[in-house]
């Protein structure tokens, strides 16, 4: 989908962070965008920030509420006539060792980071298949390629998102719907936003530096995934090393992780 002019998109969690940065880039390409976000305050702020940049529709949405998701899915078709792009960006994170945190935190992590992707994708995928055109972009994480202590359930959901995305890609090919694309995005820690204050100790921090802004990921979404059709852009680029290093014997791989102090992030 190299030319995005006149395309349409829904971006979840689109009123702040990676979502808002992605909306800005889509608008610059001539895309009409619908933003779903849980926060009414963030939606109002986004309205002011995006004024004059393009055509945007705003809706408050709890993506874990499938009734609301399917209702707003129909509204998106009414307002924009079509949905070419879905960016599943809404996310939730709580840190802490697995056995120390209450069930409701882990349940919410799963509901927002994984279960909601099922609802949103089902809201738009049938129409994409009917036209044999569209792109679903799912935000995974660098934690979707490697285990992270203190983020066990978060990492589990992000691994699941990667698997979901790849499985849907194969399903589309089996159905002869090669015009419908699927991409997962794998960011490492960003200096601001949900992971503000995170750091990777030396020497791992030299290999996987913190990302300077949300726009780094927005660029990967729009330029690498949507326009170039890349399957799983990872940022920084060194995150691509993780799946490749798994070709090492497991004991070597585990030793290397310890040497780089990645489990101490």
Image (cartoon, grey):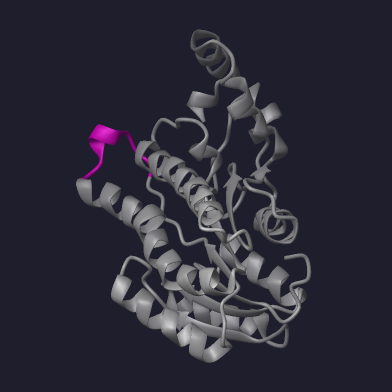
In the displayed structure, 90 sits above or below 153; it is below
Q: Residue at x 68, y 36 (%)?
A: 209
Looking at the rendering, in which quadrant would you find the N terminus? bottom right
Left or right? Give the position of 17 relative to 54: left
Vertical relation: 74 (above or below) 106: below
Q: Is residue 165 left or right of residue 21?
A: left
> Looking at this rendering, what residue extends furthest in the left direction?
103
Nearer to the camera, 58 or 167: 167
- List x then y, in percent, for residue 21: 65, 65
Left or right, residue 113 beside residue 165: left
Q: Locate residue 259: give its quadrant.
A: top right
When the figure is inspected, residue 98 is found, relative to residue 2, above or below; the finding is above
Drawn side of residue 23 relative to residue 156, left or right: right
- Prevailing secondary structure of the magenta residues: loop
Magenta region: 95-102
Q: Quadrant of residue 154?
A: top left
Q: In this orientation, does residue 177 appear?
A: yes
Residue 172 on image: x %, y % = 53, 56
Residue shown at the point (41%, 67%) measured from the top left: 122
């Amino acid at each position: 989908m190299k030319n995005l002019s006149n395309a349409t998109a829904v971006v979840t969690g689109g009123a702040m962070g990676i979502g808002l940065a992605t909306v800005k880039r889509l608008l610059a390409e001539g895309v009409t965008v619908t933003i779903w976000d849980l926060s009414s305050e963030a939606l109002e702020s986004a309205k002011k920030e995006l004024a004059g940049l393009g055509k945007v529709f705003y809706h408050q949405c709890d993506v874990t509420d499938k009734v609301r998701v399917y209702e707003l899915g129909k509204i998106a078709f009414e307002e924009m006539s079509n949905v070419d792009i879905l960016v599943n960006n809404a996310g939730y994170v709580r840190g802490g060792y697995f056995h120390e945190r209450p069930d409701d935190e882990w349940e919410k992590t799963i509901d927002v980071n994984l279960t909601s992707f099922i609802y949103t994708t089902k809201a738009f995928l049938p129409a994409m298949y009917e036209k044999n055109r569209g792109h679903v972009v799912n935000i995974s994480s660098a934690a979707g390629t490697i285990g992270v202590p203190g983020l066990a359930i978060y990492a589990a959901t992000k691994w699941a998102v990667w698997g979901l995305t790849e499985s849907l890609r194969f399903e589309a090919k089996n159905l002869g719907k090669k015009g419908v694309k699927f991409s997962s995005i794998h960011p490492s820690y960003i200096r601001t936003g949900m992971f503000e204050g995170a750091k990777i100790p030396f020497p791992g921090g030299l290999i996987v530096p913190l990302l300077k802004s949300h726009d780094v990921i927005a660029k990967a979404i729009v330029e690498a995934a949507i326009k170039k059709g890349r399957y799983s852009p990872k940022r920084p680029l060194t995150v691509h090393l993780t799946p490749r290093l798994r070709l090492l014997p497991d004991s070597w791989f585990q030793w290397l992780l310890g040497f780089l102090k990645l489990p101490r992030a």
